[in-house]
Image (cartoon, grey):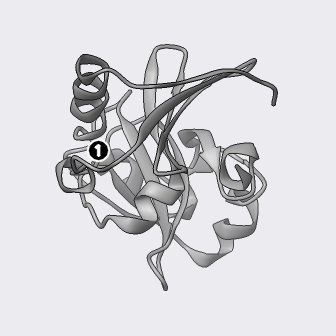
Amino acid sequence: MEIKRRYMLKKKELKQIKEELNKIIDVDDIFDKKSIVEKIITNEMDIIVLDNTPIAICKDGNIIPTLKLLLTKNSAKGRVVVDSGAVKFLANGADVMAPGIVNANPEIEEGSLVYTVEETHGKPLSVGIALMDGKTMVESKKGKAISTLHYIGDEIWKF
């Protein structure tokens, strides 16, 4: 990943990013007046950095929270719980299959941004787009439930 440009965010752009992130996780309390919020433009995507920690990715018009942000916040909005057998696959960037889902927020709609956590420790593993609603994810015994966009061990995680 090659960095092309880096700049401080304007208030209007920061407000828009906050609104998008609040759809999956409450982020209002992580920004204060002393925070340094930057946008890093790379050859692959844009990265939003808060005090040198990547908190969001801007890719294909979507603002996606990073796992580093999700580790600091606990939200049930877009949470999907997977069994421990799915962890090794998700750590390699695999999409989430419905049989591995133990629980999901019933308010999740198809096409919404969601994140997966492991059932034992509750740590975030991946962020993706729901391919079915929350209730169907839990009830379904076959098929792909979430298309993965960001996962533990990818370039953003190592950033």
Q: Residue at left 75%, top 44%?
A: 155
Residue type indicated by callout 1: Ile
Q: Is residue 77 above or below residue 10?
A: below
Where residue 36 sits in the image (x, y, percent)? 40, 43
Q: Is residue 7 above or below residue 124?
A: above
Q: Is 47 on the left or on the right of 156, as rendered?
A: left
Where residue 18 sits in the image (x, y, percent)? 25, 35
Residues 140 and 128: in front is 128
Residue that lies at the very extreme toward the bottom in this rendered image: 120
Residue that lies at the very extreme toward the top in this rendered image: 61
- Label 1 Cα crowd, 10 Å radius (few <14 / some 14-19 / many 20+): many
Q: Residue at left 74%, top 57%?
A: 153
Occupied quadrant, residue 65: top left
Where residue 130 sits in the image (x, y, percent)? 43, 37
Q: Is residue 154 above or below residue 148?
A: below
Q: Is residue 151 above or below residue 73?
A: above
Identify residue for label 1.
24
Q: Quadrant of the N terminus?
A: top right
Where residue 85 sits in the image (x, y, percent)? 67, 74
**Residue 98 appears in the picture as rendered:** no
Residues 17 and 153: in front is 17
Q: How many marks are shown on the rendered structure? A: 1
Q: Is 22 on the left or on the right of 141, as rendered?
A: left
Q: Residue at left 73%, top 54%?
A: 158
